[in-house]
Image (cartoon, grey):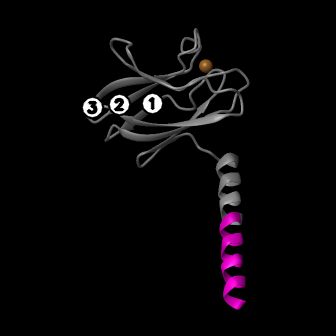
Amino acid sequence: MIGTARITGTVFAAIMALAMSTGGALADRAAGLVGNDLKVELSEWSMGFDEIRAPSGRINVEFFNVGRAPHDFSVRMAGSGELVYRSRVILGGDWGRATLDLAPGEYEIICALPGHANRGMVASLTIGQ
Ligand SMILES: [Cu+2]
């Protein structure tokens, strides 16, 4: 019974830690790149940062819509404007994630909904040199 109580306590503690880390992440989810993890705050009208430089194109992205309007998380080639990734539409308060595998080069992270990039939902993304 002692063993069972200890396991239960450990599970409870783990759940509490998870809840606390989630709360903390929501409280101070600083947008930006840490290692291979990129957090993006979608809002009217910003991506939460202007420029990201990543040594590797393998990036795990979490994007949070902290605004009210629907947004998406998309990546396009800086020169041609060709979309190389587009998420589903993320409603206000919702979030999503993506795993990118981009070749070295110049990209832009944008919201691909009409007019949103022009209003400021665009940031440069440089992979590699
Ligand atoms: Cu948008």
- Tell me whether circle 2 and circle 1 mark residues in contact (CB < 8 Å): yes
Marks counted in the figure total 3
Residue indicated by mark 1 = 51
Quarter of the picture containing the N terminus is bottom right
| Above or below, comparing residue 126 to residue 111 in the picture | below
Task: Please name the amino acid that badge 3 sits on.
Answer: Pro
Task: Please name the amino acid that badge 1 sits on.
Answer: Glu
Element type at marker 3?
A: loop
Q: Quick one: label 3 or label 1, which is nearer the N terminus?
A: 1
| Secondary structure mostly seen in the magenta stretch | helix
Can residue 3 be found in the magenta stretch? Answer: yes
Q: Is residue 26 left or right of residue 74?
A: right
Q: Nearer the viewer, residue 51 or 108?
A: 108
Q: Quick one: label 3 or label 2, which is nearer the N terminus?
A: 3
Residue 3, by quadrant, is bottom right
- Residue 126: give its label: 2
Q: Nearer the viewer, residue 50 or 63?
A: 63
Residue indicated by mark 3 = 104
Residue numbers of the magenta segment = 1-15
